[in-house]
Amino acid sequence: MRAWACSIFCAALLLAPAALAEIERPAIVVTPGAPQVYRVAVQRFAQATPAAELAPPAVEPGEGGGTTAATEAPALPDARVFRERLLYWLEFSGIFEGIDEAAYLGPEVSSAEPRCSDWSQIGADALVAGEFAGDAERLDVVFRIWDTARCVVLREHRYRQARGAEIETPARRIADDAVAAFIGRRGVADTEIAFVSDRGGNKEIYVMSADGSRVRAATANGSRNNFPDWSPDANAIVYTSYRLKNRPLLFLSTRGRGKPGLVLPDLVEKRDQYRGVFSPGGDELALVLSNGGETDIFRAELGGEDLRRLRGGRAIQVSPSWSPDAEQVAFVSDRSGSPQIYVIDADGTDMRRLTFDGVYNASPAWSPDGLWIAYATLVNGQFDIWLCDPQTGESLPLVTHPRSDESPSWAPNGRKLVFSSKRRGRADLYVIDRDGANLRRITRDAGNNTSPDWGPFRN
Amino acid sequence: MDLGMREFRGSGNREAFRRMLKWSLALHAGLLVVVLVAPAPSGVAMPRAIQVDLVAARAAPPPTPPAPPKAPPPPAPRKKTVLPERPRAAKPTPRPPPKRSREVVLEPEIREEKSLEEVLAEMRDDAGEAAPAPVVAAREPSARNAQAVPEEVLKWVRAVKRHVRRAWVVPPGFRSQMLETHVMVELDAGGRVIGRPRVVRTSGNPWFDDGVVRGIDKASPLPAPPEPGRWPFVFAPEDSF
């Protein structure tokens, strides 16, 4: 063994001078400097392409209202407002910083072929350009994202929507596309967060944009509602409500498609339904059900068919979270005497304990890339948020604060988490980068906001 | 925080657990006292190595420092020592030491460190100091074979580093990852980048590699090289050393 190692070492010694002679030039090792964000110039989208202007009259002739429709059609979205919204969502990503129009050397309005030097000279790493087109019924938003240093289009796409629809949606999606073009993962501007708030007096489910804007109620039943969980297609939320018989039962709230109401109607009389969590495929739920004595983890199809117990026993099992490949479920059990995080295969076999430190670990949330489980852990009488590597069981602190931080939930791109914190007395929702940077409060001035669930990407 | 928690609280387990915890804490405290108070076995002739071990064991308090892992089951004391009452400031959390932590390294602290390091590096560079950082130097053939690389080349290398790191954007998510891209860049006599920089060893993340190439393009022209031709570059977030 030793001789073997020695011979390798000697060979390396012999070879080294040859390698050096061949390279002869020193490698120039560059480490990161200050720049952390790409500087982006956003042009006003051109109002209409000639082709689009021709289109409406071709459809219109003969109709009485044809002329009014034709005059309405050119009234495309205000390019200046759209630019501002786009810039807002680009900066929301945390990887872009806008450049003021006053600094532009190139034109303010998009053209098909920009001169890249106009943009690289003012320090722009990226240029977003595009056009609006459309007719009376639909609006097309075409955009291109340029890498100005190399003068190449990194991504281009056409978003089409109904004419009356707001321009906020394409602005968010284009910003998310730009993020993907530069770092390989979509941004989360076009996602939403569901949460519980008692701002109206009782606990209801609310939904808001990922930046905390546009808060609206998803339930208003006057009862107690808790634990919202998004379906993977972003069209439904399952939640726990006491609105029927004052017992915890699972309900579905939908975006119009799909039918709202009881999720497990056949189990109403048999078991309390504490919590439902959609599987990554969306066709199943991990469930916390109780028959009065035992509280266990189950799984079942969406209508309640094929109900199977994953884990039971005398201990209490709660808080399931699917691994992104749906092969495993993390949950909390007090079988050891204190609540700890466990992982079990989704077929109910091979249960193993993940956390051994701390007297109270709860709320596991599996990251979208599967590499981490975020959880809340009791430290000095309050909760902090830690990350655990499910492979090794090693844990690292993510959020520590003298007041409680709870209920972590991952953004669908895995770059951020939302959690609930009482650091200002009342519970509010905060967002933080996975590496601990950019802590931001996203709920303001209204009641206690808890139990967030960051929704999936929307198509 | 969880529906389940109410259940836990209600159950008698909690009392039992508390009792166990008290016992565990008491036993640990006892052990600690014994270790700290017991007189060092001074007079006895002992093998040197063992004595050193004892001293080391006393110097480090039993519940492990920030390093999270492998602590034996009695868990409560660990976290309490890791995270003592902290003033309000939310940000600075101890930087996680284990290797796996690379991706979770806590940014705010690092950024400060980095900017300081950066300033120092720049000062060092401006002063024309020879070896910038030992780790970096070790990677460069020049360190092993210093006389092979003339001083003016090293000076140019430092100038190029300064120049490129100003142009190269490394977004937050990439800073704390173990990424390293090796690139061959062809320069003309004036320092202008000829053609496309060639990635000779990928970091494994195409977007990181892309950002490197973008950074070189943006930095062009570089300071005029000692001689035109192909020069090897290594781009790496500092943490990966």
Image: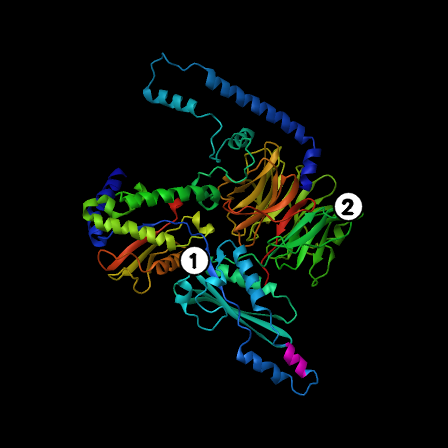
Q: Quadrant of the N terminus of chain A?
A: top left
Q: Looking at the picture, does residue B20 appear above or below residue A371?
A: above
Q: Where residue A247 is drawn, which disc sits there?
A: 2
Q: Chain of mark 2?
A: A
Of circles 2 and 1, the one toward us is 1
Q: Quadrant of the C terminus of chain A?
A: bottom right
Q: For the point 42% across and 23% down, which residue is it?
A: B59
Q: Identify residue type, mark 1.
A: Trp
Q: For the point 70% across and 37% down, which residue is it?
A: B7
Q: Is residue B44 left or right of residue A50?
A: left
Q: Looking at the picture, does residue B142 appear above or below residue A81?
A: above
Magenta-highlighted residues = A66-72
Q: Is residue A229 magenta?
A: no
Q: Main secondary structure of the magenta part?
A: helix
Pointer 2 and pointer 1 on the same chain = no
* Residue placed furthest toward the right: A245
Q: Identify residue type, mark 2.
A: Arg
Question: Residue at label 1?
Answer: B207
Which quadrant of the view contains residue A67?
bottom right
Q: Secondary structure at mark 2?
A: strand
Residue B53 at what x, y percent from top left? Answer: 38, 23
Spatial CA span between label 2 and label 1 = 50 Å
In this view of the protein, can residue A227 be seen by the observer? no
Q: For the point 64% across and 68% down, which residue is it?
A: A165
Residue B159 at what x, y percent from top left? Answer: 29, 51
The 10 Å Cα crowd at callout 1, few under 14, some 14 to 19, many 20 or more, is some
